[in-house]
Image (cartoon, rainbow, N blue to C red):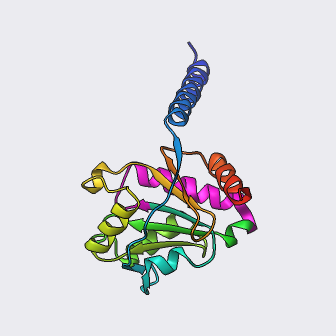
Amino acid sequence: MTARTQATVSAALVCVGALLLTAAAAATVSRSSVTYETPDVSLVRADGKRVSLPRELDDGRPVLLNFIFTTCSSICPLASRTLEEFQRKLGPQAAKLHLMSISIDPEEDTPARLRAYARKFHAGPEWQYYTGTVAASLAAQRAFDVYRGEKMSHTPVTLLRSAPGKPWLRIEGFVTPDELVDDYQKLLASP
């Protein structure tokens, strides 16, 4: 077999593997409508400002919420790349949305680390990162049913809400950017 043929076969195998992984991931994505009680906790935004979680969530804009930690090498980078692409695909419409990523490792994730992480994923001004005390992070994780005992046990969960007082769309699993755009547009269009 020539080097060119080997390269072609290798590329084809990589593509087939990627398609199988995508199909497997899509098969494991679940969606549900859920109502959550937001805890009255303070968090620290990546800009260093102390803020109220309920006020950040209820600023009048639709919200996309997820939970990450900056030293994660598996779920968080993939979820953050998905949000980066989602933000890009929305274009100017992204300015009307509040993207929020809350750290599940606040002892490590200082505002400076979160700012560096945000730059890595080209976060626009509508995408904000939060840290705070361990107690505040745990309260937020528990309130949104994402707490799994410790950071290495976390799972991919994306939460979307069209407006304050509306139920959340809970997406469990690895959703694609296109699916996320579709979910977001459907959520905004629903009464």
Image coords of residue 12 (percent x, y): 60, 24
User: What residue is at 50 percent from the left and 63 percent from the top?
Assistant: 65
**In this rendering, would 142 be left or right of 173?**
left
Whether 66 is drawn above or below 78: the answer is below
Q: Which residues are magenta?
A: 67-92
The image quadrant of residue 117 is: bottom left
Confirm whether residue 22 shows in the render. Answer: yes
The image quadrant of residue 163 is: bottom right
User: What residue is at 47 percent from the left and 77 percent from the top?
Assistant: 54
**In this rendering, would 74 be left or right of 56?**
left
The image quadrant of residue 144 is: bottom left
User: What residue is at 58 percent from the left and 71 percent from the top?
Assistant: 164
Whether 108 is drawn above or below 68: the answer is below
Q: Residue furthest bottom?
A: 49
Whether 125 is drawn above or below 90: the answer is below
Could you tell me which quadrant the N terminus lies in? top right
Image coords of residue 142 (percent x, y): 33, 61
- Indicate yes or no whether the magenta region holds residue 85: yes
Image coords of residue 47 (percent x, y): 46, 83
Closer-to-camera residue (20/44): 44
- Indicate yes or no whether the magenta region holds residue 78: yes
Q: What is the magenta segment's predominant secondary structure?
A: helix
The number of numbered discs placed on residues in the rendered structure image is 0
Confirm whether residue 70 shows in the render. Answer: no
Could you tell me which quadrant the C terminus lies in? bottom right
Image coords of residue 59 (percent x, y): 58, 79
